[in-house]
Amino acid sequence: MAKESYTKVGRFGKTHGLNGGIRILVEDAFLDAALEAEVLFAPVDGSPVPYFNEGVLLESPLVIKLEDVDTKEAAKALTGLDILLPADEVEAELGIEDFRLLEGFTVVTETEGEIGPILSVEAYPEQILALVSYQGREVLIPLNETFLQAIDPEAERVEMQLPEGLLDL
């Protein structure tokens, strides 16, 4: 059986009240996924431990209640820990599967010409990035509407307008 992979979507913040409420700080791109998830995971001793989400207690700041976290002390034990979700849930929320169709396509810019092939598409907090082979090395390029100009499925080309210096990072 394959080991499930997880994506960090935020972290647990301060406790709230005496009955186990805890503030969560979640990246905007993952907010809906985190609030809709029945289970949130936190790394404890190197392994993701499930915590069942009972719902939102307060919207601003965002405070939730977790099952079996019924005291301030129990909530305090989670303070500062990462909030993890299964990677497949996060990727579905971001629409990464649509971008994965671009793997193998060639990135082309008006200024640089042909950059190279998209080796893989990865989800990171706040954005989706293409790992592109460029001049014998790998570079990460954000896949967003600012940079994407056109996609030609027949020619398997992605036309992009990249900011100066991005390929030098």
Image (tube, rainbow, N blue to C red):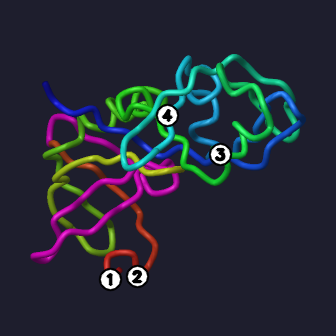
The image shows residue 18 at horizontal and vertical percentages of: 88, 33
How far apart in space, not on screen, are marks 2 and 3 (Cα)? Answer: 43 Å
The image shows residue 86 at horizontal and vertical percentages of: 39, 31
Say which residue label 1 marks.
168
- The amino acid on which the numbered mark 4 sits, given as a three-letter code, is Phe
The one of 129 and 151 positioned closer to us in this rendering? 129
Mark 3 or mark 2, which is nearer the start of the sequence?
Answer: 3
- The amino acid on which the numbered mark 1 sits, given as a three-letter code, is Asp
Q: Which one is closest to the eye, mark 1 or mark 3?
A: 3
Is 117 rendered above or below residue 128? below
The image shows residue 35 at horizontal and vertical percentages of: 65, 25
In the image, is 103 to the left or to the right of 145?
A: left
Say which residue label 2 marks.
165
Picture quarter with the C terminus: bottom left
Residue at 24% over, 41% down:
102
Picture quarter with the N terminus: top left
The one of 43 and 62 positioned closer to us in this rendering? 43
Local secondary structure at mark 4: strand
Local secondary structure at mark 2: loop
- The amino acid on which the numbered mark 3 sits, given as a three-letter code, is Ala
User: Is the Cβ of the residue at disc 1 closer than 8 Å to that at disc 3?
Assistant: no
How far apart in space, not on screen, are marks 2 and 1 (Cα)? Answer: 5 Å
Say which residue label 3 marks.
77
Local secondary structure at mark 1: helix
Say which residue label 4 marks.
41
For mark 1, does the 10 Å Cα neighbourhood hold few (<14), some (14 to 19), or many (20 or more) residues?
A: few
As for residue 149 lying within the magenta part, the answer is yes
Mark 3 or mark 1, which is nearer the start of the sequence?
Answer: 3
